[in-house]
Image (tube, coloured by chain):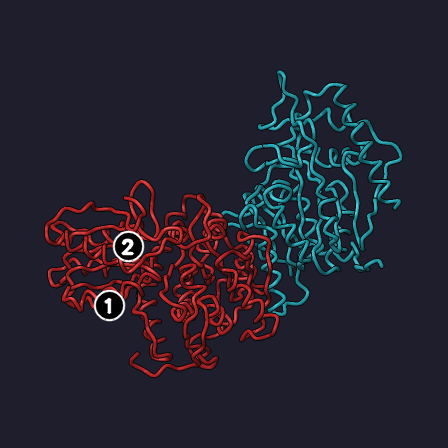
């Protein structure tokens, strides 16, 4: 940290840290349905609401499903209320239909998703197949590395989502169980600082008794393509907004996360591994170890899946960049192709005469631990490729058998 | 306790809050909604899922509602209005009505879970189901509210097929079982009864449900000027009833002294034209059983 931390250090789980962020942001309506490993987040919010500890009066709707949770927060958003919901895994899949309703009509819903694998095989353990399956639902997607980042990103999410030029829903992904149930020292900002960062929610995109309107209109073919084009343009705009908001946040709170993608020891790195979420912490440790051994390795932490840091990845492929081999760690898989992050990274870097070699790694599915040893294996494979040794382009890492 | 809604027909405004809908001629759904909005007035927020009503009342940039109106997903009428009502409450919006309107498919089938949630939580909304007894927007497929024996495209009638082989779900009973403050059935053929029920619902707080029988010329196969006639025949033959559930008690609003023969209602509709005397008899026997149960509940 380059600046003094502002706020109070408290020992909180990732879910509790997220709940503190929601308390500070003061949504008018929360609708949620319990699912492991999101449950303790929703419980904490229930406690806050019951005790009147939210920063603004809040109505908590205890709905009968995740589909209804997302529909209810959409209904409240249509009326112009700031809203929140949280889910995980099957719940997120169940919401899928409503995610698209919310994004198409540009309601700035903020949601925490405690990442968890999707059945079958039934699992309560973590991977990112849930949120990656929702990649095309029109939501901004953040992935966080720690409870602190979960808290800070939810604060940023409201700021970004509610800007009149953006008006997009934001999903903050918190790797289950690694983050939601792990306790760590978290700086909880003062209410005053949050209020200075996040103004009261005002929007033109709401129903009005003075000027009644229709929302979530049906579009015929005449307007549909154009409306989707506008939606895409907003995501382009959001890239700059996310970076700017992160800088503003840094100015007020002394912490920052570097827009869409952060790097660690990449300045002269030749072997670079790109990861999302909690695996970034493990990879930092491995990078330090390998650096101590004199190996030129680095980490890319992809913070945003959508909008995707396409320009950042393209820049890796410039003659000035030291990167020789890029590895991508996916805690998801698109069956029949490869890990989703890997596909996007490759596509972003593509140009004729590309100098970078790439490897895609799938690991940590359904709670399978991504260990330091696994990360070292990945860097080893990147080194092999750099030395001209053969490596399969797409590999599963850390399996009990190969 | 009877709630005095202070409703006077003479107070109704001439203003139409639903007009220009692209529904089929003789559409009862439009009649029901038009009448309901006359009572509920301009401070109404309407939410409709993907259904006939949504498909015929909004296509950018045209809209047929003069009040605030949102479209939601097929299963999400009740859950969306729950959120709207929560927001209205938190914003201190006084004297507004949050109104969900959905068909029988969107209510008794795909939307039932969310509706049950609203009723259990007693959210401050009115939910109006226009029951045209099948999935009409997709082109006449059977729903759980399609009556026994009716032809639909998914319950064919012809050689060896007898139309729908299951009895309809009793939505009124399901909602009343949630002990909501107000629940009623109605029919577009009894507009004053319908509007009085809407007025009563408006004056109550909490989850209110009105189940409106809504004959559909296109789906049922009759000439469009006969919507009211068939609505009346359904009630007169005992195949639809007008009832209310209020303060834990059920009340019948109209008890025909003798039922008209079911055949009168069934015969002219294409969806029942495969039926025989035997079918009419079965339908009347079932009707009589249902009415015995109804009368017992009203007595108790």
Q: Residue furthest front?
A: A400
Residue in the foreground of this view, choosing between A399 and A226: A399
Residue at x 68%, y 26% (from the top left corner): B149
For the view shown, which residue lies furthest in the bottom direction? A4
Q: Quadrant of residue B104?
A: top right
Indicate the chain on which mark 2 is placed.
A
Q: Which chain is represented by red in the image?
A: A
Residue drawn 38% across the image and 59% down it? A141
Write the residue at 27% across / 63% down: A283
Q: Is B129 above or below relative to B133?
A: below
For the C terminus of chain A, the quadrant is top left
Shown colour of chain B:
cyan
Asked if A353 appears above or below B254 in the picture, the reply is below
Pointer 2 local density, CA inside 10 Å: few below 14, some 14–19, many at least 20: many
Note whether residue A136 is visible.
no
Q: Is residue B10 above or below residue B284?
A: below
Which image quadrant is residue A288 in?
A: bottom left
Disc 2 and disc 1 in contact, CB within 8 angstroms: no
Q: Which mark is residue A264?
A: 1
- Residue A218 appears at what percent x and percent y? 49, 48
Report the front residue among A135 and B242. Answer: A135
Q: Which quarter of the rendering shows the N terminus of chain A?
A: bottom left
Is B235 drawn above or below residue B221 in the view shown? below
């Amino acid at each position: 940290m380059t600046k003094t931390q502002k706020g109070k250090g408290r020992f909180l789980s990732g879910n509790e840290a997220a709940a503190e962020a929601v308390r500070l942001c003061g949504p008018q309506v929360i609708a949620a349905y319990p699912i492991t490993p999101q449950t303790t987040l929703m419980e904490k919010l229930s406690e806050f609401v019951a005790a009147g500890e939210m920063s603004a009066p809040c109505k908590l709707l205890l709905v009968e499903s995740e589909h209804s949770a997302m529909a209810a927060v959409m209904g409240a958003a249509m009326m112009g209320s700031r809203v929140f919901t949280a889910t995980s895994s099957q719940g997120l899949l169940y919401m899928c239909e409503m995610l698209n309703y919310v994004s198409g009509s540009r309601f700035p819903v903020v949601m925490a998703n405690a990442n968890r694998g999707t059945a079958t095989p039934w699992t309560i353990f973590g991977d990112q197949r849930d949120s990656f399956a929702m990649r095309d639902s029109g939501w901004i997607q953040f992935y966080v590395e720690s409870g602190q980042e979960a808290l800070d990103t939810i604060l940023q999410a409201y700021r970004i989502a509610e800007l009149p030029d953006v008006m997009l829903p934001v999903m903050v992904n918190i790797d289950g169980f690694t983050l939601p149930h792990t306790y760590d020292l978290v700086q909880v900002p003062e209410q005053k600082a949050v209020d200075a960062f996040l103004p009261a929610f005002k929007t033109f995109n709401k129903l009005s008794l003075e000027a009644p309107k229709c929302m979530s209109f049906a579009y015929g073919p005449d307007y549909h393509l154009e409306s989707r084009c506008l939606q895409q343009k907003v995501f382009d705009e959001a890239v700059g907004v996310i970076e700017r908001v992160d800088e503003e946040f840094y100015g007020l709170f002394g912490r920052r996360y570097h827009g869409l993608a952060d790097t660690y020891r990449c300045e002269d790195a030749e072997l670079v591994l790109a990861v999302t979420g909690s695996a970034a912490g493990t990879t930092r440790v491995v990078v330090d170890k390998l650096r101590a051994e004199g190996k030129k390795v680095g980490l890319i932490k992809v913070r945003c899946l959508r909008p995707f840091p396409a320009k950042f990845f393209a820049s890796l492929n410039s003659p000035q960049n030291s990167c020789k081999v890029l590895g991508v760690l996916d805690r998801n898989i698109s069956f029949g192709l490869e890990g989703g992050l890997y596909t996007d990274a490759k596509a972003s870097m593509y140009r004729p005469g590309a100098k970078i070699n790439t490897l895609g790694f799938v690991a940590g599915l359904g709670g399978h631990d991504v260990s330091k040893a696994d990360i070292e294996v990945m860097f080893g494979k990147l080194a092999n490729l750099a030395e001209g040794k053969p490596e399969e382009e797409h590999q599963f890492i850390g399996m009990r058998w190969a | 306790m009877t709630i005095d809604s202070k409703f006077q027909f003479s107070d109704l405004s001439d203003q139409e809050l639903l007009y220009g809908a692209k529904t089929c001629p003789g559409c009862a759904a439009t009649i029901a909604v038009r009448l309901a909005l006359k009572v509920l007035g301009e401070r109404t927020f309407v939410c409709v899922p993907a259904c006939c009503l949504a498909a015929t009342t909004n296509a950018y940039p045209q809209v047929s509602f003069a009040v605030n109106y949102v479209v939601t997903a097929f299963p999400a009428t009740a859950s969306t209005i729950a959120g709207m009502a929560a927001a209205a409450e938190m914003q201190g919006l006084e004297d507004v009505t949050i109104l969900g309107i959905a068909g029988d498919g969107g209510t008794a089938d795909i939307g039932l879970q969310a509706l049950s949630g609203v009723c259990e939580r007693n959210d401050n909304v009115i939910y109006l189901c226009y029951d045209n007894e099948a999935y009409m927007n997709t082109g006449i497929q059977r729903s759980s509210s399609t009556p026994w024996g009716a032809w639909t495209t998914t319950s064919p009638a012809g050689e060896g097929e007898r139309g729908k082989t299951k009895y309809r779900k009793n939505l009124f009973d399901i909602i009343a079982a949630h002990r909501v403050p107000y629940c009623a059935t109605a029919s577009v053929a009894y507009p004053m009864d319908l509007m009085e029920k809407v007025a009563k619902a408006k004056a109550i707080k909490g989850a209110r449900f009105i189940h409106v029988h809504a004959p559909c010329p296109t789906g049922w196969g009759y000439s469009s000027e006969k919507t009211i006639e068939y609505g009346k025949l359904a009630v007169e033959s005992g195949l639809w009833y007008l009832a209310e559930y209020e303060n834990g008690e059920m009340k019948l609003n109209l008890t025909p002294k003798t039922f008209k023969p079911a055949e009168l209602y069934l015969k002219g509709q294409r969806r029942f034209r495969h039926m025989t005397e035997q079918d009419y008899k079965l339908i009347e026997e079932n009707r009589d059983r249902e009415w015995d149960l109804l009368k017992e509940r009203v007595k108790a």
